Amino acid sequence: MNNELKFDLKQLRVLLLTFRYSQYFPVVLPSVIIIICVGIVLLFFVPQVNSWFSIQDEIQQTQERISKAKNNLELLQSSNTQNVDADFYAATAALPPQKDFAVILTALTNAASVAQITMDDFSFAIGEVSQDSEASVSAGQQRSVPVVANENGMFPVRVSITAGGTLTGVNAFVREIEEKLPLTQVESVDFTEGKAQVSLTFFTRPFPEIIFNETEPISVLSPQDRLLLQKLSEKL
Amino acid sequence: MNEEINLLKNKKISASPLLGRLFALRAASLSILFGVSFFSISLFILIALSPLPRLQDQESSEVQKVTLFHPKMAKILLTKERLVHINTVLQTRPLYHELLEQVTQQLSGDTSIDTVKLEATKLTISASSQSLGNVESFITNIQELNSQKKYFGKISLVNLYLNTESARYIVILEMVGNQPIKTQ
């Protein structure tokens, strides 16, 4: 065993000496250095350069987000809280997020009062009163009307009223209901001999889920929006 | 024999190109080594001194400040969302009071409207008068109104008769549109 090991070591020494004093020895070291350098460039340097460019892109995007966040902060700080509240109130009064029967009845009675007609009877077709149940309220009539959103995402509340008065009064009632809040659409009018049956639709739309993105620019209200809000506020 | 001993002369001629190439190879390897080292160290320093961490801290600070205004932000976003749908309703809904007012303005003399039945695409009116001329005038006015405003596609005279009890001429007009009546 020892003799074999000694023999192997002796052969190794001969090999190394042969290589050391061969004509190729001066070429090997520089070649190895070049190969190692090429390997370092390919395996480490190129990915690091890509990483650096990615960092530069990320820096630019971060700077843009900072700028947008600062703009949003400035906008929110400069906007008058009372005006924001008033605009929000006007918009939700025009298009409530949920069915509010008190508001609907108030709108109907106010319109009838202004138009000087008598409101004899009314019925609602409201559909769901809660998420777990469907119900309808009617003066002496049970109806089950599934309430689904229409093509505009609105949830309609249909109301039928019977009123007494002249055609002029009925027309005044229709005008009052159409011009005041909440937003209403008259579906049909049936007037005969001092009695009128008016079908209306009140619109509601639940609030959407808000996903806050602080670095997304908050757009200010356009002049058209301002004008609309002003008109809505006048209708309150 | 002499040629084998005197090797110096031959070596001088044949060794120069090889030495030149060897020198070039060594120079290239050293250049590459120093070049790679220099650029690697430079790149490392550039990445280490990148302002990205500072900017990310600044971004989270700004975002934190904006989050304090979430309630106000929510109201602004919801107001804009409401206005979009309010606009849709205002642009699509008909205003029937305008139609009814304009129809009633076409009355002349003692003509009065007895019944009105207004639906999405149809308006049926029953009007009466003691004078047939007033009735005829009312029909003409309705036709002119429709030719101006284009509310309806077709106007039909459903009935025209004399109610002997009240001594009034009664006319029933039916106005039909191909689509929901648009008054705006």
Image (cartoon, grey):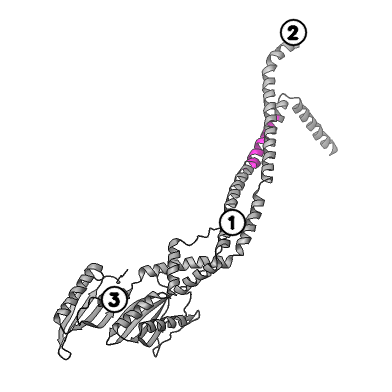
Q: Amino acid at mark 2?
A: Asn
Q: Chain of mark 2?
A: B
Q: Is residue B61 on the magenta stretch?
A: no
**Extreme residue in the right direction:** A2
Q: Dividing the picture into quarters, in which one does residue A73 lie? A: bottom right
Q: Which residue is mark 2?
A: B2
Q: Which residues are drawn in magenta?
A: A30-46
Q: Chain of mark 3?
A: B
Task: Nearest to the eye among marks 2 and 1: give it.
Answer: 1
Question: Do we see residue B153 in this rendering?
Answer: no
Q: Is residue A40 on the magenta stretch?
A: yes
Q: Residues within 10 Å of mark 2 (few under 14, many from 20)?
A: few
Q: Position of residue B140 (x, y in %)?
A: 18, 74
Q: Which mark is residue B101?
A: 3
Helix, strand or loop under label 3? helix
Task: Nearest to the eye among marks 2 and 3: give it.
Answer: 3
Identify whether B145 is placed above or below A169: above
Name which residue lies at 67% across and 28% down.
Answer: B28
- Quarter of the picture containing the C terminus of chain B is bottom left
Q: Position of residue A162 (x, y in %)?
A: 35, 86
- Give a yes or no on whether discs 2 and 3 share a subunit: yes
Name which residue lies at 19% across and 77% down.
Answer: B138
Name which residue lies at 18% across and 79% down.
Answer: B158
Q: Which mark is residue A70?
A: 1
Q: Position of residue A76 (x, y in %)?
A: 56, 62
Q: Amino acid at mark 1?
A: Lys
Helix, strand or loop under label 2? helix
Q: Dividing the picture into quarters, in which one does residue B83 lie? A: bottom left
Question: As rendered, which of B32 and A67 lies closer to the eye?
Answer: A67
Q: Is residue A6 left or right of residue B62?
A: right
Task: Nearest to the eye among marks 1 and 3: give it.
Answer: 3
